[in-house]
Image (cartoon, rainbow, N blue to C red):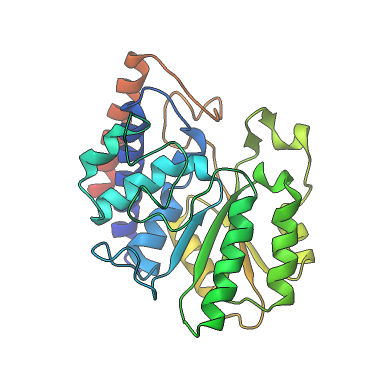
Amino acid sequence: MDTKRIEKLAAQIRLETLKVIHSRGFGHVGGSMDLADLMAVLYGEVMHFDPKNPRDPDRDWLVLSKGHAGPVAYATFGIMGFYPMAEAYTLNQPHTKFPSHTDRKLTPGVDLTTGSLGQGVSAATGAALGDRIDGRKNHVFCVIGDGEADEGQVWEAFHFAYAHKLDNIVFIIDNNGYQLDGKTVDILDHGDIARKAEGFGLYTQEVNGHDVEAIYQAIQNAYSTKGVPSCIVLDTIKGKGATFAEPKREHSSQPSEEAWQEAIAAAEKALREVRK
């Protein structure tokens, strides 16, 4: 993997994610920004997809079960050429193709409609089973919030995937330690969430969610592990790269225009720095 190229892509995704949400003035900054490194690895190096044919039946699937992170997907898809980037700057506007939660009927590149937390995990697991029945060789990547993991059906899906030996699905837990109402440890403590996933029989790895090399290697390890589903726990910083959101680990943000401009300028600087 060309690490420098993927780090540049991650910085570009962060900048465009900010610009997408800024177009509305408020939105889910925290849980979108912390996924930029993952999205760069997936779409810059790992996944099979065709922007000109988003419904290619042999594509790899991305399911953002934490559907409120839609802006990072919209930024990534725009950069990858699914549509002109400027189209995503209509986030949550009337008649937009870019709602706050991902919708497969509206946005090219979105594989499953999500947003009701927990349900995307179940649907992604079903998609993986369907692909295996059809004899396809693709993979399904399902991104789950650590707060979302409060939902029982997340763990039921893990159990189902293990029982059916679905080694074509990779569950990815965004372990940023915060959810809508505060710290996950204060609301519903999962303890060691990686150990818990491993307890359901999943091949589980825990890595730095902002280290593109570590993410890439974890996915390669998952690919080479046969007969069981995989889970990658990404230890992330909520709001990573957003100057107004990262310090407070904000779930949703509505900063002043001055704060927006400061954050965008910082993201532009970060992109310039990684390009050197």
- Picture quadrant of residue 115: top right
Count of numbered labels shown in the rendering: 0
Q: Which residue lies furthest to the bottom in this view?
A: 135
In the rendered image, the vertical position of residue 268 relative to residue 102, given as above or below = above
- Picture quadrant of residue 61: bottom left
In the rendered image, the vertical position of residue 91 relative to residue 64, given as above or below = above
- Between 68 and 184, which is closer to the camera in this rendering? 68
In the rendered image, the vertical position of residue 219 relative to residue 84, given as above or below = below
- Picture quadrant of residue 11: top left
In the rendered image, the vertical position of residue 121 relative to residue 75, given as above or below = below
In the image, residue 178 lies at what x, y percent? Answer: 64, 35
Which quarter shows the N terminus? bottom left
Q: Residue at x 77, y 46 (%)?
A: 190
- Between 132 and 168, which is closer to the camera in this rendering? 132
In the image, residue 166 lies at what x, y percent? Answer: 63, 76
Is residue 276 shown left or right of residue 206?
left
- Between 18 and 272, which is closer to the camera in this rendering? 18
Is residue 210 shown left or right of residue 226?
left
Q: Which residue is drawn at 44% across and 62% down?
A: 213
Instruction: Report whether residue 76 is seen.
Output: yes
Q: Residue at x 44, y 47 (%)?
A: 103
Is residue 55 shown left or right of residue 217?
left
In the image, residue 125 lies at what x, y percent? Answer: 61, 66
Instruction: Report whether residue 233 is seen.
Output: no
Q: Which residue is drawn at 79% across and 41% down?
A: 189
Is residue 181 shown left or right of residue 4?
right
In the image, residue 214 lies at what x, y percent? Answer: 50, 62
